[in-house]
Amino acid sequence: MKKLIVSLICSLTLQMSALEYELQFENDQIAVSKIKIMPKEEIGLHRDVLPQIVIALKGGTITRLEADGSETDVHFPTGKAVYRGIDPENELHKSVNKGSEPVEIISIQLKSLSG
């Protein structure tokens, strides 16, 4: 019972923390956002529907929690550009910063590849 209560409290804590997200620029071709993911913070179920370039201002590792229960670590080295493609349709995942430091990134989503 004690384990269940601790688990529920941890779950509620993760759900209450607010993702720091700031849209910095957007037009019909790209959207640029600054995102800060705090330690132990979880981003709920979602699908990456646009390809994006991610540049870490403060790097780290984000763990993808797939719907099938598998986990994949995605590394964002400080100051390096990382390309992230779109996720397959109907494949949702959660993302969590399991580290002890915040991960701060700039995400450049590519809405259109034509000029």
Image: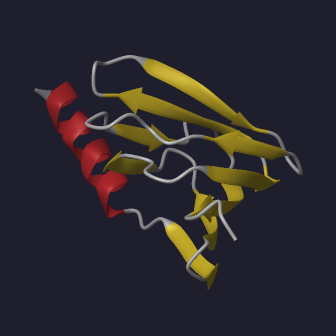
Hey, which quadrant is residue 2 in on the image? top left
- Indicate the position of residue 67 as horizontal and vertical percent values: 28, 27
- Indicate the position of residue 88 as horizontal and vertical percent values: 38, 34
Q: Relative to 21, say whether 6 is above or below.
A: above
Q: Nearer the viewer, residue 96 or 70?
A: 70
Q: Nearer the viewer, residue 18 or 115?
A: 115
Task: Determine whether, in the image, residue 38 is placed left or right of residue 106.
Answer: left
Q: Relative to 53, say whether 28 is above or below.
A: below
Task: Determine whether, in the image, residue 115 is placed left or right of residue 46.
Answer: right
Which residue occupies the extreme left position in the image? 1
Q: Looking at the rendering, in which quadrant would you find the C terminus? A: bottom right
- Indicate the position of residue 49 as horizontal and vertical percent values: 43, 51
Q: Relative to 85, say whether 17 is above or below.
A: below
Q: Please name the residue shown 27% across and 45% down the image.
A: 11
- Indicate the position of residue 89 as horizontal and vertical percent values: 31, 38
Task: Determine whether, in the image, residue 77 is placed left or right of residue 86.
Answer: right
Q: Nearer the viewer, residue 87 or 63?
A: 87
Task: Determine whether, in the image, residue 34 is placed left or right of residue 91.
Answer: right
Q: Please name the residue shown 55% across and 42% down the image.
A: 97
Please say whether residue 102 is visible from this viewpoint. no
Please say whether residue 24 is visible from this viewpoint. yes
Q: Looking at the rendering, in which quadrant would you find the N terminus? A: top left
Colour scheme shown: secondary structure
Q: Please name the residue shown 58% across and 79% down the image.
A: 23
Which residue occupies the extreme right position in the image? 79
Q: Please name the residue shown 57% across and 55% down the image.
A: 38
